[in-house]
Image: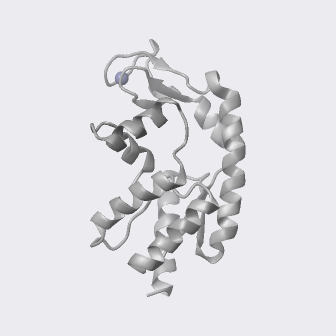
Amino acid sequence: MVMGDIFREIAKTNTSLGKKIKKVIEAGALFDDKMTLMILTSKIRKLKKMDKIIIDGFPRDVGQARAFDKYVSDSLGNKILFIHIRLPRANILDRLAKRRVCVNCNFITRVKKTNKNNRCPKCGGQMMVRYDENKKAIKARLDVYSLQSRLLRQYFRKRVLEVDGNQTISKVSRDLINGIKKYFLKRT
Ligand SMILES: [Zn+2]
């Protein structure tokens, strides 16, 4: 479950919650803990029969982690594994600088894959660099992120899986799968 996708999905519905979420997205603000937890737990309740789920983009801070931890152990009795994919800051900035986004359909690609006219391979729209426009904002967000993720790792302690993100995609996924298997095998 990707949190951003869930929010965008609900924002499209013509409900009071959908309208509320739409407003937050349009303002570029972050969702408060209460709203995030409410949406997440209602999604999980529907998924109850599934063995395992991966949540992307949550928790963002220790407050959310505590509240979610309590919800999970109270109602589902499941185990949580916090996954941290390590990537050097310079590497993240480099990846962002090479990223191009289509203004028309939001298709995302790397610089080398776009054609010389800078047109979207999917719809022919203009491909834009988002990074250059908000270098400062992105760096500030990375600062917040690295602090929050450090505090989260301290909170989850032995329930943390760290994977080196500076490898090929297949090596990263192999490390993830092995780490997850090992962790849950020990606990069943
Ligand atoms: Zn496009």
Q: Position of residue 182 (x, y in %)?
A: 50, 79
Q: Is residue 125 visible?
A: yes
Q: Is residue 123 left or right of residue 37?
A: left
Task: Identify the coloring.
Answer: one colour
Q: Position of residue 139 (x, y in %)?
A: 70, 36
In which quadrant will I find the N terminus? bottom left
User: Ligand 1 appears in which quadrant?
Assistant: top left
Q: Residue at x 54, y 58 (%)?
A: 59
In which quadrant will I find the C terminus? bottom left
**Nearest to the observer: residue 75 or residue 47:** 75
**Nearest to the observer: residue 28 or residue 112:** 28
- Number of numbered callouts drawn: 0
Q: Residue at x 47, y 60 (%)?
A: 173
Q: Is residue 165 left or right of residue 11?
A: right
Q: Residue furthest front?
A: 16
Quadrant for residue 62, please give it: bottom right
Q: Is residue 151 above or below residue 17?
A: below
Q: Is residue 114 left or right of residue 93?
A: left
Q: Is residue 96 above or below residue 182?
A: above
Q: Residue at x 36, y 44 (%)?
A: 17
Q: Residue at x 62, y 51 (%)?
A: 166
Q: Is residue 78 visible?
A: no
Q: Position of residue 53 (x, y in %)?
A: 38, 65
Q: Is residue 100 above or below residue 8?
A: above
Q: Residue furthest top?
A: 117
